[in-house]
Each structure stands twice: as structure tokens, then as C-alpha cells.
Image (cartoon, coloured by chain):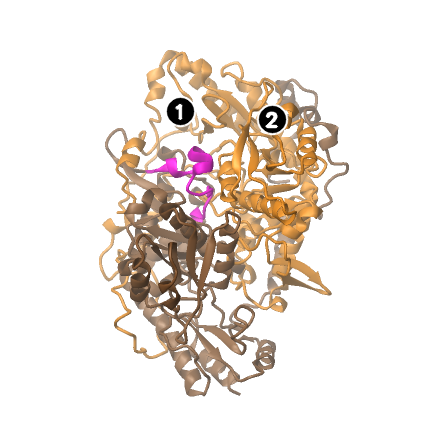
């Protein structure tokens, strides 16, 4: 086996040096009652070329563009990824290193993550960003736990227009310790209805997503006013499509205390939902309550600029059960990809691409409306929007699948009141002829 | 000495480069007209530097050259299993039908991917001896959290929530932090003079307020917890559960049966045992394996066989819920799947050679370094700096000097139960010749510690930077440029 370098002569020489007769002797410390009774029953080993064929066969069953026209977003987005990013990420020096515990020989990762933190902070309009979380969902859960720690309160308000899967993850993280989640409904415009906040008290945080699950951009000024009307309550803004901040105002500039979400759009392939990267940023005042790793700038013995992991007294390996989070390994390589992506676009390119996304989805939205399809929510959107198809739309949806068109995500599975409602997505990768085809097919 | 000095390039920060108007991205052609946008909602866009494509390529190429990595050197970071990351795995994970797959595709359009998940779950169950698996946790620590959520849900479903959890002093730091998230108070258990748990110590602490025990086997001293069966019986007799941290699974593939050991829940680190790249700190994957009794508590959604097809199902009322926006770090699962298929039955040989390599290093260094537990180790060996401290040379100095010899340092000052620990995990990937070089370097350092301790205090001498001022970094944090 090409990954196992030992020759029989190596093994014999090494056993001699150790002073045992066989490899089995090294395992003598394992009692018989802990041992397997039979060898592992695994499929036979495949050589490299047979493995290639096998994997190609598995992958071939997946519906992908261009054979399929897929108008799905909902937290996972199709964007172009420059070849430079794919190739630079593969450099073994990045790929096969670990967490930079030894800064003298990890400056590459450390500087890159410091740059990532900076670009994330600039994107979100925030003062401090960490080195990444697992994904947008756990980032939101950790943000709520952080708000609970900071405020020493046990109740949070969460918009129902937050991605339903993110809400499920929040429940998983908050339920065992008995923290209470107050759900805020969405209004007729597709934005969070904040009226319920007037009666809620003792909230650690109010969390919304913008653009929200329906693609609607929240009125963050109103969210800020309603949140901070209560002394001490933190405003959390989540997101699943950070490209939106190339066009729309960054949440940090509108008063959010914690901004967190999914960064998959930033140069990371969809890969059936992961790995992506959880972006996480907050106000400097709350820096020491933040979960996750942080890279900071310092100097070496000769006064040269360098970078280290810092503020680790917040972390599990020092503080153990009193840590700000249990997170250890995060999504380092995906954070690196996100940094490369933001740097590749630059400020001008990021804005231009965001605008193209907005215009492409806007074109589809207008064309559908002109063809008589109902748009139930009136709030401005980015990349995604909800349509209501005529009653009995499931049949049409299935017919379109047979024609290799995935006409968005049926929302009834998440919102029982939204039967015949679909969440459609278009990005810069969508061709105009495909958008026209979708309009033609759903209205046929 | 393998280490030498080559030409390393200085490279500014991104925003010290570039000029407004440059771009390293090919903007797609515009086919649609501009749409009106609400000026009240729009912002200026992010303040990113503008760079050309070659500036980007050179920037990241130069940065990469400042790292040590498995691809360049032996990286014996104890407890992290820095084995070779096969290149073919990257090819598989980037196939269009995998990398471009949308997670919410209808089941009929993603059967190959569901098959991969289903089969990998079966294989991990077979490898561990446990009955059911969830691949959803995104890293080891999230796997631990899942395990603790299962403990919590199990006791709650019996109507008897519990408040405490036993954690040996050899545990990974993530263990108590994960338990705390579920509201459990960690009760430390001291390991015995042999470096392993003694059943009596567990019996003295285990009661009906205690949810169970979290342990790592082999433990962080690189020793097998030989009393685990008795420990498990004590915990089970009081209605508790046994959690095993599988971070050290690379020692025991094909040897142990976790369910025979009395383990109820185990997490694996695919980025350790199953060769997926560490990526400078993730992404990893932390699948959770459980007994049949605990299967109803696994996270949702789960892949199930539905007639001819595979399907997602979420209607498991006892489930701890969802931990990831989708199904976890699927791209990492693909690499682990590819690794297992590449090895087949040779997977057992992985552990045999990993253990041989660790024992070979242990034998090669015990004349020069203090070995707190002088008996065969598993996949890693733990020395201390006790002898070198006589010359005022610490584990940190030894680690930094090793860099000059062309090796990544081992894990230091962990486990905490040993003062000044040097935890060395060579993995099965390294050849005898590389191990010989490593042993020679460590022995040369032991001699330097006696003859020229200042050389070690000042090390490293050949890295891009000298030692960094971590106190300054923490006292006045500068986290953004």
C-alpha cells in the first residue's frame, strides 16, 4: 500500500530496537475483553484508477449544471470560483499544516487569517472578527450563547424569517441549558414583525437574518431601534449570502452588536452543504466574550512584525469548562478561501459582482411578475425571492424536475402556511436564456 | 540536519499592496439591465484592496512558504495525527457531481451522495464496533457536544436529568467545555500511578446525579485504558453512560471493539485517523457513533433506506436535533470515504505501524529524555523536560530548537498531568529513515541542552521569524489591520 512505507526489513530492525519480538507484543496492554472478535469487514481496497472510476460513478448520479437548471439557494449558492483560488488552496503548505500553535513556522497561515479577520470586519462593518466558526448556523447559535453570557439573561428573540435550519441548530444548542427562545413572526412584506418586541422583556438578544430566508432585506434601522430600546439587549444580525453587503449597507454600520453567518458564497464550492465557513464578528467591547480562535499582530525578538494566536485564555484548552466555547478546530482552509476570494474581487469588483447578482435575480423576479406569477412579499430582495404559484403547483414542480429544471425550494415543508410558495434563486452564474426558460415553463 | 536556510520572501499585508481599480476576478458578461435599488438600504461596499491576479498568486505563494506542513516535513504533533493526506482524495472531492452539488437537491437527484453517506456510516460502525453513526458534526469538539447532548437527552427522556459528568485529568480540554454546554458540571478523576484510570477512583465518584464519564482511549499519555471494561460496568451500574473521545483511534483500528469495551458513544476525527487534511485548522469532521440503544438520539436528518432508494428522514422524536445547516462537512466525508476505500483491509496495518513508529521513537529517546511511563506506548509517546530543566532548558526550548533541525515540534505542555510534556505522534506515514533523523535531532538537542543552553533559549535560529511576543499580542490586542 503506497501510504505505508515499512518494508519487512524495516519492521524487523525497528522491533529489534524496541526489544520486542512482534508488533502484536506492542498491543499486549489491551485486554482480550476489549478486542474485536473478527477482522473488520470492509470493502476490498481499490487502486487509484479503480477508485477514480468508482467515484465518478457515484458523482454522476448528481444533478448539476449545465445539464440541469437549478434555481436553488436557501443558504447554499452557486458563484464562480477563480481557478487561482482552487490552485492556491491546494498548496500543501496551507493544506497539510494544522492550527498554528508554533508561530515561527506558521506565519503563512497566521498572516492569512489575520487578513481574513480584517476583510471580514470590513465586509460586515465590525470592529473584531474571529478566525471562523463551523458554519452560519452554529455561528448564530454561538452568537446567542455569547449574548446570554454577556447579559447574564436567559431569553432570546429569534426571527421566524431566519433560515429554518439555523433555527433548528439554535434550538439544539440552547435547549439543554434551558434557555428560552421567543419567535418573532414575519410580516406581510416578508420582513420580521417587530411589534412583539414591545412586550418582551429581559432579552439577551434579538436575532434577525438579512437578507433573510425569503431573500428579503430587513429594515435593520428599525431592528436596531427596537432592540436597543431595551437596555443591554444585543442586536445580532445573521446572514447566509454575504455578497449582499457589496450592495446593501453592512449590518455593523447599522448598530448590530454581533454579525455572523455563512461565508460559502466567498469562493467555496457548495459540496452538498459543507464545508463552508462561519463568519463571526462583534464590537470590540465584547471581544473577550467571543468564541473561537483569534490571530493578533505582534513582533518577534528582533522587532519584526509577526502574528500569533492570541487571547487564548478564553479558550477551552486553557479555561476548560469555563471557556467561551468548546470550538477548537474550525474551518481554517475555508476561511483562507474566503480571504482569497475577497482579495481577488477587491472592493470595486465585489461591488460590481454584487450589483450583477442583484440585477440578475431582479430580472427574473420582474419577468415572472410580468408573466402573472404572484410575488407575495414586497420588501427589497437580494438573489432570492418567494413566488406563489397557482394552486396544485406540486404537479407542475414535479413535471419540471422531469425536464431537468429545479424550480426553487418548496417552502411548505418549513412554513405550513406557505403552500404553493417557492424560494427561487439566481446569481451571476445564471444565464438569461435559462431565466427566460424558467419563466416560460412555470407559466406554461 | 535536514533544516537549512533558503530564500524566503517578505510579503506585505494585502492592503499594503494593489491599487484602486485592479482586479483578480473575471466579471461575467452582463446580459440583464440594471434594476432600480432602494438608496436608503445601499451602502458603499466593502473597503477591500484591489489587486491583480499575479499579485494574488504571489502573495499567497509567498505566505504558504512560511509554513511547515506534512507535505514538507515530519509533523509529530501529539494527539493531532498528522499523517499523509493522499492527493487522490482531493481529486475525488472536487468532482463536479460532488463539489457542485446543492444540498437541497431532491433525493432522486442526489442518490450517489446519499449512498456515500450511508456507506461511510456503515463502515465507521464496522470499524468501531458500534451500531449507528451520524456524520453531521463538523469537528471533534462538535462531535463531543453531540455526545453530551445525547447523554442529556437520554437522561431527560428517562425523566431523571443529571447534573455532573466525570472527566479524567488526562482528557482533552474540549471535553469539559463540551460538557459545560449541556449544563453538566465536570468532576475530575485522577489517573493512577500507572497513568491510567483505576476503577476504584471512578467508583468513589460515580453516583446517580452523574450522567456518565468522558474518557479518551488510548488516553493522552499514549496508554491504553486497560480498566475500561470495569470502569464502564461501574458507570452503567449507576445508570450512567460512557463517552469515548476517539481522537486517538489511529492506535487501535482493527484491534478493539468499542461496544465490547462498554463504550456507549464515541466520536471520531476524520482529519486525524482518516487522513483528511488539517487545512491550517480545519475543516474537520467529527462523526458520532453510538450503541443501538442510543441510535434514536442521533442528530437529524438521517439517511435511511426507503425501498430501492435512499432518503432523508427527520421524524425521530428523541433526536437531539440538528447541528449543522446541512449535513456537516460533506467534502471532508468524501475524502475519508476515499481513504477507507483505498486501504480496505490494510486499515488495520495503519494502526500496527503507527504504534510501531511511536515505540521506535520512545526506545530511541529514552536514554536522553525523561519518560514518565516506561512501558510500550500506543500511537504516541510522552516525554518530559525534567532532565533538561537542570540546565534551565524547557520543553518550549526543545520544541523551538527542533524547528532548526527541520521538524515541526511535537505537542508541548499537554497532557497537563505531566509537567513539561513533549507529546510525540509520528503516525504510520513516516519511514524508518525519517524517524532516525528525528531521533538523531532530538538527541543532538539533548546534548546541546547540556553544553550550550543559550543556543536553545534563542531558538529557532533558521525560521522566518524569531520567537514572537505573545504577551504583547494579548495585552493590547491588534486583531484587524
Q: On screen, B118 above or below A16? A: below
Task: Tell me: B144 left or right of A303.
Answer: right
**Which residue is pictured at 45% across the width and 65% down the height?**
A160
Q: Secondary structure at mark 2?
A: loop
Residue B126, quarter of the rendered image: top right
For the residues labelled 1 and 2, the Cα–Cα distance comes to 23 Å
Can you give x and y, in whole percent of width and height, for residue B107 in the image?
Answer: 62, 66
Rendered image quadrant of residue A109: top left
Going from the N terminus, do you reach mark 1 or mark 2 first? 2
Whether residue A309 is in magenta: the answer is yes
Whether residue A142 is visible: yes
Indicate whether B412 appears above or below A420: above
Disc 1 is attached to a residue of which chain? B
Q: Chain of mark 2?
A: B
Name the spot of residue A427 as percent of width and height, x first: 41, 70
Residue under the image location 59 percent in, 47 percent down: B336
- Near-viewer residue (B91 or B398): B398
A69 displayed left or right of B236: left
Q: Residues within 10 Å of mark 2 (few under 14, many from 20)?
A: many
Q: Position of residue B27 (x, y in %)?
A: 34, 67
Pointer 1 local density, CA inside 10 Å: few below 14, some 14–19, many at least 20: many
Q: Name which residue lies at 34% across and 51% down.
A: A281
Q: What's the colour of chain B in the image?
A: orange
On residue B223, the disc is 2
| Residue for badge 1 | B396
Decide which of B136, A43 is in the foreground and name it. B136
Nearest to the observer: residue B106 or residue A62? B106
Q: Residue A57: in sight, yes or no?
A: no
Which hue belongs to chain A? brown
Magenta part of the chain: A308-333
Marking on residue B58:
none
Amino acid at each position: 500500500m503506497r501510504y505505508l512505507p515499512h518494508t519487512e526489513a524495516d519492521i524487523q530492525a525497528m522491533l529489534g530496537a524496541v526489544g520486542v519480538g512482534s508488533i502484536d507484543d506492542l498491543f499486549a496492554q489491551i485486554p482480550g475483553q476489549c478486542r474485536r472478535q473478527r477482522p473488520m469487514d470492509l470493502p476490498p481496497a481499490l487502486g487509484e484508477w479503480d477508485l477514480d472510476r468508482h467515484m465518478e460513478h457515484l458523482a454522476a448520479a448528481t444533478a448539476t449544471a449545465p445539464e440541469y437548471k437549478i434555481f436553488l439557494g436557501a443558504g447554499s449558492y452557486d458563484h464562480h470560483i477563480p481557478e487561482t483560488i482552487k490552485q492556491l488552496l491546494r498548496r500543501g503548505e496551507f493544506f497539510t499544516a494544522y492550527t498554528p500553535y508554533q508561530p515561527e513556522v506558521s506565519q503563512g497561515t497566521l498572516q492569512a487569517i489575520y487578513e481574513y479577520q480584517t476583510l471580514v470586519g470590513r465586509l460586515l462593518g465590525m470592529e473584531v472578527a474571529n478566525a471562523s466558526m463551523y458554519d452560519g448556523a452554529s455561528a448564530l447559535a454561538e452568537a446567542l450563547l455569547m449574548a446570554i453570557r454577556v447579559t447574564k439573561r436567559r431569553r432570546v428573540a429569534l426571527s421566524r424569517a431566519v433560515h429554518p435550519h439555523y433555527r433548528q441548530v439554535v434550538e439544539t444548542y440552547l435547549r439543554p441549558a434551558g434557555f428560552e427562545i421567543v419567535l418573532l413572526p414575519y410580516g406581510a412584506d416578508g420582513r420580521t414583525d417587530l411589534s412583539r418586541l414591545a412586550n418582551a422583556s429581559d432579552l439577551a438578544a434579538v436575532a434577525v437574518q438579512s437578507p433573510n430566508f425569503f431573500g428579503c432585506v430587513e429594515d435593520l434601522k428599525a431592528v436596531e431601534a427596537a432592540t436597543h430600546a431595551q437596555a443591554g439587549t444585543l442586536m445580532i444580525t445573521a446572514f447566509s449570502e454575504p455578497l449582499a453587503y457589496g450592495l446593501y449597507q453592512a449590518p455593523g454600520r447599522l448598530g448590530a452588536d454581533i454579525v455572523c453567518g455563512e461565508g460559502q458564497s466567498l469562493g467555496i464550492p457548495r459540496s452538498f452543504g459543507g464545508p463552508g465557513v462561519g463568519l463571526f464578528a462583534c464590537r470590540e467591547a465584547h471581544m473577550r466574550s467571543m468564541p473561537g480562535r483569534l490571530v493578533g499582530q505582534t513582533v518577534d525578538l528582533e522587532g519584526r512584525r509577526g502574528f500569533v494566536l492570541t487571547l487564548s485564555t478564553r479558550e477551552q484548552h486553557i479555561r476548560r469548562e469555563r471557556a467561551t466555547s468548546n470550538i477548537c478546530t474550525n474551518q481554517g482552509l475555508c476561511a483562507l478561501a474566503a480571504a482569497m476570494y475577497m482579495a481577488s474581487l477587491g472592493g470595486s469588483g465585489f461591488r460590481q459582482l454584487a450589483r450583477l447578482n442583484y440585477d440578475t435575480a431582479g430580472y427574473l423576479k420582474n419577468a415572472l411578475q410580468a408573466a402573472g406569477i404572484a410575488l407575495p412579499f414586497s420588501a427589497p430582495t437580494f438573489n432570492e425571492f418567494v413566488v406563489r404559484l397557482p394552486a396544485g403547483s406540486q404537479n407542475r414542480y414535479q413535471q419540471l424536475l422531469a425536464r431537468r429544471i429545479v424550480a426553487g425550494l418548496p417552502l411548505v415543508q418549513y412554513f405550513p402556511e406557505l403552500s404553493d410558495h417557492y424560494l427561487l434563486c439566481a446569481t451571476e452564474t445564471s444565464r438569461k436564456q435559462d431565466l427566460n426558460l424558467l419563466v416560460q415553463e412555470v407559466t406554461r | 540536519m535536514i533544516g537549512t536556510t533558503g530564500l524566503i520572501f517578505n510579503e506585505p499585508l494585502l492592503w499594503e499592496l494593489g491599487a484602486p481599480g485592479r482586479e483578480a476576478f473575471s466579471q461575467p458578461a452582463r446580459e440583464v439591465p440594471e434594476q432600480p435599488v432602494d438608496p436608503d438600504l445601499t451602502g458603499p461596499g466593502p473597503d477591500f484592496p484591489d489587486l491583480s491576479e499575479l499579485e494574488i498568486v504571489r502573495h499567497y505563494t509567498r505566505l504558504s512558504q512560511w509554513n511547515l506542513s506534512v507535505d514538507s516535513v515530519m509533523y509529530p504533533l501529539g494527539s493531532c495525527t498528522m499523517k499523509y493526506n493522499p492527493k487522490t482524495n482531493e481529486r475525488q472531492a472536487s468532482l463536479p457531481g460532488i463539489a457542485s452539488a446543492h444540498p437541497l437537491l431532491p433525493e432522486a437527484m442526489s442518490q450517489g451522495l446519499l449512498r456515500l453517506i450511508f456507506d461511510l456510516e456503515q463502515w465507521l460502525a464496522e470499524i468501531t464496533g458500534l451500531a449507528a453513526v451520524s456524520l453531521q458534526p463538523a469537528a471533534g469538539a462538535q462531535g463531543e457536544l453531540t455526545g453530551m447532548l445525547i447523554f442529556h437527552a437520554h437522561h431527560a427522556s428517562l425523566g431523571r436529568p443529571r447534573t455532573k459528568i466525570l472527566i479524567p485529568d488526562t482528557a482533552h480540554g474540549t471535553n469539559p467545555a463540551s460538557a459545560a454546554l449541556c449544563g453538566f458540571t465536570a468532576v475530575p478523576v485522577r489517573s493512577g500511578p500507572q497513568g491510567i484510570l483505576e476503577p476504584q477512583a471512578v467508583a468513589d465518584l460515580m453516583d446517580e446525579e452523574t450522567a456518565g464519564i468522558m474518557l479518551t482511549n488510548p488516553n493522552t499519555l499514549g496508554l491504553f485504558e486497560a480498566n475500561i471494561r470495569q470502569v464502564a460496568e461501574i458507570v452503567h451500574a449507576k445508570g450512567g453512560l460512557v463517552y469515548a473521545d476517539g481522537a486517538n483511534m489511529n492506535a487501535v483500528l482493527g484491534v478493539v471493539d468499542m461496544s465490547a469495551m462498554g463504550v456507549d458513544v464515541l466520536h471520531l476525527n476524520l482529519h486525524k485517523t482518516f487522513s483528511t487534511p488539517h487545512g491550517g485548522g480545519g475543516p474537520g469532521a467529527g462523526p458520532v457513533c453510538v450503541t443501538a440503544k442510543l441510535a434514536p438520539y442521533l442528530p437529524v436528518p438521517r439517511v435511511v433506506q426507503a425501498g430501492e432508494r435512499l432518503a432523508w428522514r427527520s421524524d425521530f422524536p428523541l433526536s437531539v436535533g440538528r447541528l449543522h445547516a446541512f449535513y456537516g462537512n460533506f467534502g471532508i466525508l468524501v475524502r475519508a470515504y476515499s481513504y477507507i476505500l483505498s486501504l480496505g483491509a490494510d486499515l488495520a496495518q495503519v494502526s500496527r505501524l503507527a504504534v510501531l513508529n511511536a515505540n521506535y521513537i520512545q526506545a530511541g529517546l529514552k536514554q536522553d529524555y525523561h519518560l514518565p511511563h516506561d512501558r510500550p506506548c500506543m500511537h504516541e509517546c510522552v516525554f518530559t523536560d525534567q532532565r533538561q530543566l537542570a540546565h534551565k532548558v524547557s520543553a518550549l526550548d526543545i520544541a523551538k530548537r527542533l524547528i532548526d533541525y527541520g521538524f515541526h515540534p511535537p505537542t508541548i505542555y499537554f497532557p497537563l498531568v505531566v509537567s513539561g510534556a513533549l507529546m510525540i505522534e509520528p503516525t504510520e506515514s513516516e519511514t524508518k529513515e525519517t524517524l532516525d533523523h528525528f531521533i538523531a535531532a532530538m538527541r543532538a538537542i539533548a546534548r546541546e541542552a547540556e553544553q550550550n543552553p543559550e543556543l536553545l533559549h534563542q531558538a529557532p535560529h533558521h525560521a522566518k521569524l524569531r520567537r514572537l511576543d505573545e504577551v504583547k499580542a494579548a495585552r493590547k490586542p491588534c486583531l484587524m489591520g
